[in-house]
């Protein structure tokens, strides 16, 4: 197995790493770079717990090779808050208790941010469709949808 | 295992053709990485085609479209001209997986993964789409229905790669549609899929039609008998009934956990009829 040298940008910072060819971006983030916010759920692109932004689109980082990140722009859940100030989505997830065990939460936050970046005023149906690739086994989803709606309203106020 | 990300098609072909052992093309990776993860494939070489500019582009071609093999579902959905000309193809591609999957999954990947249940393929076959194939012996263009030969198996030779999907020029008063049956509302694999594409004349008479079915045979099938039921008619109730019967008659499905043979045969007719009704509406027909 050959090792690949990768230079990329993660949450705005230039990052360089070495990885194995078959190593996923998720494994690189967690095991090599210490960014453990992205979670491993299914490893097959079904659960969305590993969601990150890749060149402005939300992807499952378990379905991206670490080698593919060369020269790309990656945003993870760690980049959501501005220092100590949580993103409105994070605030609203807390306020609405939109999490219980929390494993799915980073993925939901990244996917919800991706939705609101493209559509600042989504309907409930649009929210549920956009988040269909994120599975939660605790909340029943309703609190998550309410939190996203409330965060969207707050973000629209600017 | 080696990873390469060439910037030209020729370099990609050379890599794929030159490697002894198993070489795999990486476009969106939504099938390949899962197969690697579950040890169904262990490639010696991975050729990532996303650094090839022509494979990332949707271009106008002879009045139609040339869709690079690495164009994602999300990019298809964002292309207004493509959506307007071929709504059935775009809706079929956009049915696949989640938002996350749409950011990566490609038409060419869906085609070359060769699943009988691939959602975009019946729509592409109905559309009369072609695959532009590049290989060590040059380039060829073939109908998309000739790529898959069975579950997971394609007619591509060693070193060959689908570089683009080509959608033909649209005749006036044409419409297409794709429908699938799944037991959920989204995020599932088709139990049956049906794509219909038709063209009307100025009097509303169907002059050309193509009907394709997914998940009812070992690969996606074109059903000329179902299309023939529409041609020469105004796609009225009687024609639609004949279309449904012909679609059902063409099925040779298996029983599996998703559905029985009998169910698939019945539903194929129903979906073909409903897809034809939507295609008719999109073509500006009366129904």
Image (cartoon, helix red, strand yellow):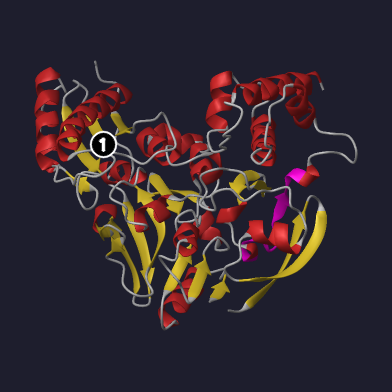
- Tell me the subunit letter for badge 1: B
- The stretch in magenta equals A67-77
Q: Position of residue A18 (x, y in %)?
A: 71, 71
Q: Position of residue A62 (x, y in %)?
A: 58, 54
Q: Is residue B54 above or below residue A81?
A: below
Q: Residue drawn at (36%, 60%), measured in percent from left and top?
A: B132
| In front of the other: B81 or A100 | A100
Residue B163 as seen in the image, left or right of residue A137: left
Residue indicated by mark 1: B194
| In front of the other: B27 or A59 | A59
Q: Quadrant of residue A70?
A: bottom right
Quarter holding the N terminus of chain A?
bottom right
Residue B166 as seen in the image, left or right of residue A82: left
Q: Residue drawn at (18%, 20%), measured in percent from left and top?
A: B203
Q: Residues within 10 Å of mark 1 (few under 14, many from 20)?
A: many
| In front of the other: B32 or A50 | A50
Q: Is residue A150 above or below residue A105?
A: above
Quarter holding the C terminus of chain A?
top right
Q: Is residue B160 above or below residue A24?
A: below
Q: Is residue A57 above or below residue B55?
A: above
């Amino acid at each position: 197995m050959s090792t690949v040298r990768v230079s990329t940008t993660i949450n705005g910072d230039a990052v360089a790493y070495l990885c194995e060819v078959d190593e996923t971006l998720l494994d690189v983030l967690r095991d090599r770079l210490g960014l453990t916010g992205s979670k491993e759920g299914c490893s097959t692109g079904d659960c969305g717990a590993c969601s990150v932004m890749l060149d402005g689109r939300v992807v499952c980082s378990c379905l991206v090779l670490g080698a593919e990140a060369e020269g790309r722009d990656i945003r993870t859940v760690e980049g959501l808050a501005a220092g100590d100030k949580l993103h409105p989505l994070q605030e609203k997830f807390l306020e609405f208790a939109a999490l219980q065990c929390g494993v799915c939460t980073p993925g939901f936050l990244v996917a919800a941010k991706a939705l609101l970046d493209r559509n600042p005023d989504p309907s409930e149906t649009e929210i549920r469709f956009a988040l269909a690739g994120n599975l939660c086994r605790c909340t029943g989803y309703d609190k998550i949808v309410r939190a996203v709606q409330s965060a969207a309203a707050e973000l629209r106020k600017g | 295992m080696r990873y390469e990300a060439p910037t030209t098609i020729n370099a990609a072909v050379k890599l794929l053709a030159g490697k002894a052992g198993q070489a795999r093309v990486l476009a969106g990776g939504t099938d390949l990485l899962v197969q690697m993860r579950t040890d169904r494939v262990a490639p010696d070489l991975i050729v990532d085609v996303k650094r090839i500019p022509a494979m990332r582009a949707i271009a106008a071609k002879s009045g139609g479209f040339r869709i690079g093999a690495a164009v994602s579902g999300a990019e298809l959905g964002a292309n207004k001209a493509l959506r307007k000309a071929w709504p059935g193809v775009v809706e079929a591609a956009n049915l696949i997986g989640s938002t996350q999957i749409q950011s990566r999954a490609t038409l060419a990947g869906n085609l070359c993964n060769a699943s009988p249940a691939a959602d975009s393929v019946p729509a592409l076959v109905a559309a009369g789409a072609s695959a532009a194939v590049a290989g060590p012996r040059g380039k060829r263009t073939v109908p998309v229905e000739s790529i898959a030969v069975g579950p997971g198996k394609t007619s591509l030779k060693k070193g060959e790669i689908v570089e683009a999907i080509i959608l033909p020029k649209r005749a006036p008063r044409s419409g297409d549609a794709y429908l699938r049956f799944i037991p959920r509302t989204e995020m599932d694999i088709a139990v049956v899929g049906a794509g219909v594409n038709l063209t009307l004349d100025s009097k509303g008479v169907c002059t050309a039609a193509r009907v394709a079915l997914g998940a009812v045979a070992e690969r996606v099938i074109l059903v000329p008998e179902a299309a023939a039921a529409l041609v020469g008619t105004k796609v009225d109730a009687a024609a639609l009934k004949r279309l449904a019967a012909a679609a059902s008659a063409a099925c040779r499905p298996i029983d599996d956990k998703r559905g029985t043979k009998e169910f698939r045969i019945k539903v194929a007719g129903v979906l073909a009829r409903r897809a034809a009704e939507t295609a008719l509406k999109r073509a500006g027909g009366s129904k």
